[in-house]
Image: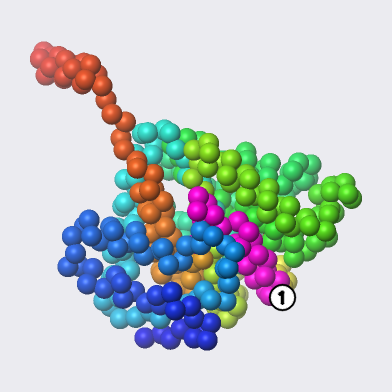
Amino acid sequence: MKKSKSPDNTNPKIIKSTSNLKNFKNLSRKERMERTKKFSEQYRITEGNSFELKKYNTDISFDTDAEDKSLVAETLQLGVEALATMQDILYAQDKWSVLLIFQAMDAAGKDGAIKHVMSGVNPQGCQVSSFKAPSSEELDHDFLWRCQKHLPERGRIGIFNRSYYEEVLVVRVHEQLLQSQKLAEKLITKNIWQERFEDIRNFEKYLHRNGTVVIKFFLNVSKEEQKKRFIERIEDADKNWKFSTTDIKERGHWEEYMNAYEDLIQNTATKDSPWYVVPADNKSYARIVIASAIINALDDMDLEYPKVSDEKIAELNEVKKALLNEK
Ligand code: ATP
Ligand code: MG
């Protein structure tokens, strides 16, 4: 049994084990779905005012015995299957779209989480976009522009690997980056970050009112775990490509990033566009939380396959009869 790393910072609300998924095997599929769906609610922030990052664990006590491992695999499988079914309906209905935003420090497992959770989903109904340091063309526009171009069409799930939230993270931590945006001096006010939060809130509200459900994930990895993963990337030749020396520079600004994350969650977590603060030191656990959160959101959307009119059904029956009578 692994112990939680920071017991002093523990929020009593946060369940720190998979105990609520125990005895899973004895449950019906419907009950298992219900439990999987509810599992992520403990990490959801819908109202940011009193949010304190230090109360959210990066790690959870996690049984490493075989039973727990198979439980994790089973839950994830259920999540992946449910997601695929719901995505199929989303696509058929062609009414709503879903935008999933992933933000994290380096090596927190964004790429792996996206890959695993979306593994059962039809690639036609899903688009992943990654946002790196902006190009000169992108810098010639407002900070939301490049992300707007990649918003999901109706019926699709869009995934942002990093996003416009970088504006209130890396740009805030390295304020000189604001200069490269060619903004007029008078636009860089002393309230610039509050203004950015307001713009993001309004943008997400706008998306919501236009049929896009926005869900945001912060993969909350600890500084110790990041160190371990960086060392792995250096020691394992096949992982060398994943390591960049700028990652180490950013690690040096850890506290500033954590403060920036806390502030942005306080200012942009809403009922319609919640943040999930996902414990990310254990990759499997993080993936279950993410799968669960997506199912939860899709389930709330009351998805159903488009209804076919009586005339259409009669027409289909005629066609079937003709096909069966074909010589
Ligand atoms: P990986 O390292 O797993 O390949 P990554 O998302 O870290 O994925 P990188 O190319 O290493 O990709 O890093 C992208 C970098 O671009 C990050 O350091 C990020 O902070 C930076 N970046 C993203 N958006 C902006 C922005 N608007 N302004 C400045 N830098 C940005
Ligand atoms: Mg990187």
What residue lies at 74% left-to-right and 43% top-to-bottom? Answer: 142
Q: Which residue, given by chain and number where applicable, does mark 1 sit on? A: 252
Please report the residue visible at 54 percent of the width from the left and 60 percent of the height from the top: 47
Query: Within 10 angstroms of label 1, few (less than 14), some, or many (20 or more) residues?
Result: few
Image location (x, y in percent) of residue 254:
67, 74
Q: Quadrant of the C terminus?
A: top left
Residue 284 vertical position relative to residue 79 in the rendered view, above or below: below
Q: Residue at x 30, y 63 (%)?
A: 35
Q: Is residue 320 left or right of residue 42?
A: left
**Mark 1 lies within 8 Å of ligand 1 (Cβ measured):** no
Tell me: 16 left or right of 211.
left
255 magenta-colored: yes
Residue plotted at (38% across, 54% down): 296
Label 1 sits on a secondary structure element that is: loop
Q: Residue 87, image x and y in percent?
A: 37, 43
Residue 251 in the image, given as x and y percentages of width and height = 68, 73
Whether residue 35 appears in this view of the structure is yes
Please name the predominant secondary structure of the magenta segment in the image: helix
When asked about the image quadrant of residue 105, the answer is bottom right
Query: How is this picture coloured?
Result: rainbow
Q: Is residue 241 visible?
A: no
Give whichever of 279, 224 is nearer the camera: 279
Range of magenta residues: 254-276
Can you say which quadrant of the picture contains the N terminus? bottom left
Magenta stretch contains residue 156: no
Give the amino acid type for the residue marked by disc 1 in the picture: Gly
Q: Is residue 235 above or below residue 25?
A: below
Q: Where residue 140 appears, x then y in whole percent?
A: 79, 42
Number of labelled discs? 1
Of residues 323 and 159, the one drawn nearer to the viewer in this rendering: 159
